[in-house]
Amino acid sequence: MSIKSRFRGFKGILYKEVLQLMRDPIALFFAFFPPLIQVIVFGFAINTDIKHIPAVFYNQDQRRQSREFLDQMRNTQYIDFVAEVHSEKELANALTGGGKYVGIKIPPDFSENLAHGKPTNVLVLIDGSDNTIAAQALNVTSNLALRNSLEELLRESGKGIKDMPLDTRPKILYNPDLRSQDFFVPGVIGVALQLSTIILTAFSVVRERERGTLEQLMVTPLSEFGLLLGKIIPYTVLGFLMACFLFLIMSVVFKVDVAGNVFLLLALTLVFIFTNLSIGLLISSRAKTQTEAIQIAVATLLPSIFLSGYIFPRFTMPDIFYALSFLIPTTYYMNILRGIILRAAGAVDLGIDIIVLSGMGLLLFLLAVKRFKKQIS
């Protein structure tokens, strides 16, 4: 088949899709509004740097040293003492009732033991029903106890912090303030782009099938390649404009700037959008109704959220899920997003991700063409 015949009808379909898209304000609304809401809501709501954990304390000592110890915990800004209790039963009830995640019990001989250099035990009860909060509370209380113990031992031996035999100097790169937004907002953009672009193109074809216009197009001398390419290009442009808007929101609202090459980021975003639109075409070749198309599109979203590295590190997953994550285009786009935005990675650094994502996009589009060709036959 010649190149001219392969693209037969492309211009006509492209013109029709652009006109149809411009006359469909609902499609434009759903193209921009849901991703915008997702990025803003999840960007603000997801925060792994948990501070001001509500806590209660039972201070049986009530002397200066114990009050100073509680003040040290409060000054970390990770622990907020919201109430004082006066018995072990009240301490347990406060945690069981919910809303308080940490309970501190200071024994009556706390100050006396410290004054005589004797070990003293502080009971720290942590609500483990929320493992994220529990892990943060455990780190804060353990580190504070360790630091106080070291300072006491060094003071007794007549040495200072500078005399510590081992001194590590950690330096955090790319996100020195450990801001959750720097990590999550680029990921939210990837997930939001995936869902909206897949639904856009799947709806476009399924809607034509429901109206009966797709069958009319199929009996014309259009080529399958020209038909699908003409349909996909307007949505590629729309998805690209949507991505630019989301990157602007990321920079202005969440103060997450692109450390690397912006043009490389936009070019690879275009590849990711094309890949998602091809997935949408594949879905539309299978779905008979718009409801069915939505269900399949949402089903593709869940693996992207949980297996792509958007929330959980992929290397911590069981082997089977880790292997499945390689089949998800969003996995590679997550690496590209965080690589360019946070680490200023270049095309060479992201070579494998770029090659695999591009190959997936081309393969999925050709599969969609093949399925439509089969349907027409």
Image: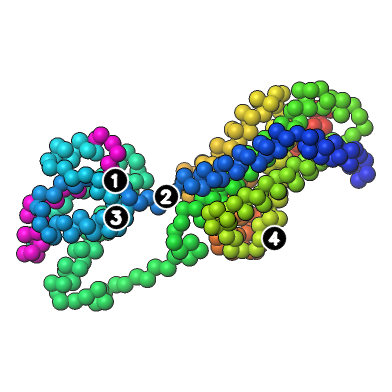
Q: Can you see residue 205?
A: yes
Q: Residue at x 31, y 72 (%)?
A: 167
Ranked by sequence position, the earlier of labels 1 and 4 is 1
Which of the labelled discs sits on residue 54, or is there none?
A: 1
Q: Quadrant of residue 353?
A: bottom right
**Residue 213 vs residue 56, the one in the foreground:** 56
Amino acid type at circle 3 is Val
Q: Position of 263 compared to 75: left or right?
A: right
Amino acid type at circle 1 is Pro
Q: Secondary structure at mark 1?
A: strand
Question: Can residue 44 be found in the magenta stretch?
Answer: no
Q: Position of 47 compared to 225: left or right?
A: left
Q: Residue at x 25, y 56 (%)?
A: 73
Residue hosting label 3: 140
- Quadrant holding the N terminus: top right
Distance from the alpha carbon under mark 1 to that under mark 2: 16 Å
Amino acid type at circle 4 is Phe
Ranked by sequence position, the earlier of labels 1 and 3 is 1
Residue hosting label 4: 263
Residue hosting label 2: 48
Range covered by the magenta-colored residues: 96-117
Q: Residue at x 50, y 53 (%)?
A: 181
**Percent position of residue 189, x then y:** 59, 47
Distance from the alpha carbon under mark 1 to that under mark 3: 13 Å
Neighbor class of circle 4 (other Cα within 10 Å; few <14, some 14-19, many 20+) is few
Question: Can residue 116 be found in the magenta stretch?
Answer: yes
**Residue 9 vs residue 320, the one in the foreground:** 9
Q: Quadrant of residue 22?
A: top right
Q: Secondary structure at mark 3?
A: helix
